[in-house]
Image (tube, rainbow, N blue to C red):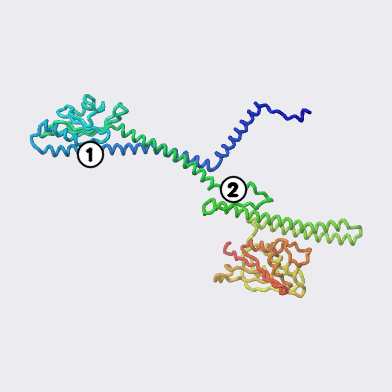
Amino acid sequence: MSNFLQPKEVPKQAYLEEVPTEGASYRKSMWKGIFGETRTRILLLYAVLLLLLSSLAVPLFTYLLFTSVDSRVRESVDEEQDAFFDAYADWEVEPNQTTEDLEDFVDQFLQSTIPEDDNFQIILIDGEFYRSSPFYLLDPLKPGSELFERWQTVTEFVIAQESTDSPSVGSILYTAAPIMVDDEQRGVFVVAHTTAGERQEALAGVYLFALFAIATVLISLLLSWTAAGRLLRPITTLSKTAQSISESDLNQRILAPTGHDELSELTNTFNAMMDRIQSAFDSQRAFINDAGHELRTPITIIQGHLELMDGDPQERQETMELVMNELDRMGRLVSDMILLAKSERPNFLQLETFLVRAFAEELLVKAQALADRRWLLVGDEAGDMVGDRQKLTGAMLNLLRNAAQHTQATDSIEIGYCFSAANGQNSYRESPVEFWVRDTGEGISPDDQQRIFARFARGKHQQRRSEGSGLGLAIASTIADAHGGCIQLTSQPGKGATFRIILPNMCQLL
């Protein structure tokens, strides 16, 4: 068998070296993806802030806990001190008390009372240690210690706290008060408390608090990371949808989450934006297709006649006239398309103030050159308005040209205007301005009335006129919309048609 048909053997060592490399690359990209997510960065920032606050809270918590423990210890020491001297006051009422009597009282008191944990009740009589409860004393409290020698010299009530070198003892909080018998000091009553046990219990509580806080932070971060993923899912979907959208596919939308939060608003805004973009693209695509179709016809006509043109001077003259006519129509079509494209710009209108009557009379003069019809002018109100005079002239001429194309020589076409009073407005400077073109021609069917304002639209039963671009009514509607107005149509088949352009009077804007 030929060598090239033999399966190629992969060295075992090479295989073992390749797999870990791919696995490491995958793990690296996976971790990079996780830590690159917005929710991970937000939660990491939240974790850092939370841990920082927790690290500040632990010392504060420890301080407050130790303060609370010290306060409770002081209260217990004071209570035991007060209990002894309350009992001593009752005993001291009897006169001529002796040392033996004092010892009997001490014995009875210590037998009847049990000190709090880590509390020691120590009694000195005549400067010497007599008895304590509990019986066993820690080294810093035993007779002969520095602290005990200090107690032997007490002549008035003392409350103090002393630190020791023993970790098992910690510091010692004590009160020492002299015992007086017949106005003579016979002893000292000491209540001492070692803080090591209380502090260790407090530190154990702090340790458990720290562990609980860390566990709570980790669990909350995990749950928050999962919940954040669900909350930020619309953003992820938004990104994927935006990546999948192309000029040929604009149908992708995001399922809007329930609620009225920022993500719901973002989703609805994105979907609304996509609706506008899709509408614009669909309109542009239809416009390009229709424009291509409209331009293709005159180009075909020109090309066909130029190919068939021979040397006959008369035929050449006729061909040249036809070619020039088609070129003129193509020029008007291109101009109309440019006008519609510019209508989206903010500076589309060039506003000026002009007299409405003079504007209507100018339209009548220009309309008489369009066709041989009975032209009428209606409206005698004096007043001015603000608008783009040139573009309004073009819009009205498109309506007049459309009326001329759908009427006969015996028909009449009326140009009219008026100031419409609205909301009780009496001044023409605040009233809408209305222009209309009314004819007595063939009228427009209800089906055609719904579509004739679209670009390149014509009546279904209308024979194609070469001089029309199919953009006249669309341009008139666009100019009316740019002025903040509208265009209305009223027509019945066989009874003519009336086109009205209703515009707000913008005199107050200047």
- What's the amino acid at mark 1? Glu
Of helix, strand and loop, which one carries label 2? helix
- The reply, left or right, for residue 75 in relation to residue 51 is left
Residue placed furthest toward the top: 144
- The reply, left or right, for residue 12 in relation to residue 186 is right
Q: Quadrant of the C terminus?
A: bottom right
Q: Give the x, y percent position of residue 270.
A: 59, 52
- The residue singled out by tag 2 in the image is 237
Q: Give the x, y percent position of residue 298.
A: 80, 59
Asked where in the image residue 56 lies, by quadrant, the reply is top left
Asked where in the image residue 462 lies, by quadrant, the reply is bottom right
Count of numbered circles on the image: 2
Q: Residues within 10 Å of mark 1 (few under 14, many from 20)?
A: few
- The residue singled out by tag 1 in the image is 79
- The reply, left or right, for residue 393 in relation to residue 159 is right
The residue closer to the viewer here, 305 or 255, is 255
Q: Residue at x 57, y 64 (%)?
A: 508
Q: Residue at x 69, y 28 (%)?
A: 10
- What's the amino acid at mark 2? Thr
Q: Give the x, y percent position of residue 32.
A: 57, 37
Q: Can residue 359 be seen here?
A: yes
